[in-house]
Image (cartoon, rainbow, N blue to C red):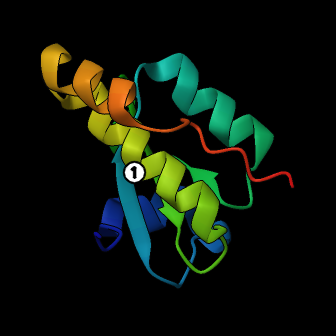
Amino acid sequence: MRPLRKSDLEALGPDAPTGEILGARTEHEGAKFALIEEQPEIYFTTPHFQGYPAVLVRLDLIAVEDLEELIVDAWLARAPKRIADAYLESATRWPPDTAQ
């Protein structure tokens, strides 16, 4: 988790969130912008992260399942390929199928 910097607060203005924030790595900037476009009330970015594949997340608004997926995806984006492949091979299903 990270607090918003003074420059972040200035850039976001009145839209700056007041709750807990998590910064999470994404596979690439396209994935970052897709998350922001799909759920701008949860995901956002600041000028500090311009050109960097990471997204900021409002923890008080994200569903637990979505947070779990975000964290695993962030880990997969940075994990050594051999370890990530072993994890994916051993996982029963990723992303998990929540529809029953």
* Residue 26 can be seen, yes or no: yes
Quarter of the N terminus within the rendering: bottom left
In this rendering, would 36 be left or right of 48?
right
Pointer 1 local density, CA inside 10 Å: few below 14, some 14–19, many at least 20? some
The image position of residue 24, as x and y in percent, is 37, 48
Q: Is residue 88 above or below residue 18?
A: above
Q: Which residue is mark 1?
A: 71
In this rendering, would 68 be left or right of 66?
left
The image position of residue 30, as x and y in percent, is 56, 18
The image position of residue 32, as x and y in percent, is 53, 31
Q: Quadrant of residue 86?
A: top left
Q: Who's the residue at 58% across and 50% down the image?
A: 44
- What's the amino acid at mark 1? Ile
In this rendering, would 78 be left or right of 10?
left
Q: Who's the residue at 21% across and 29% down the image?
A: 78
Of 94 and 32, the residue lying toward us: 94
Q: Who's the residue at 78% across and 40% down the image?
A: 38
Of 100 and 82, the residue lying toward us: 100
What secondary structure is found at the residue carrying circle 1? helix
Q: Who's the residue at 84% across and 51% down the image?
A: 99
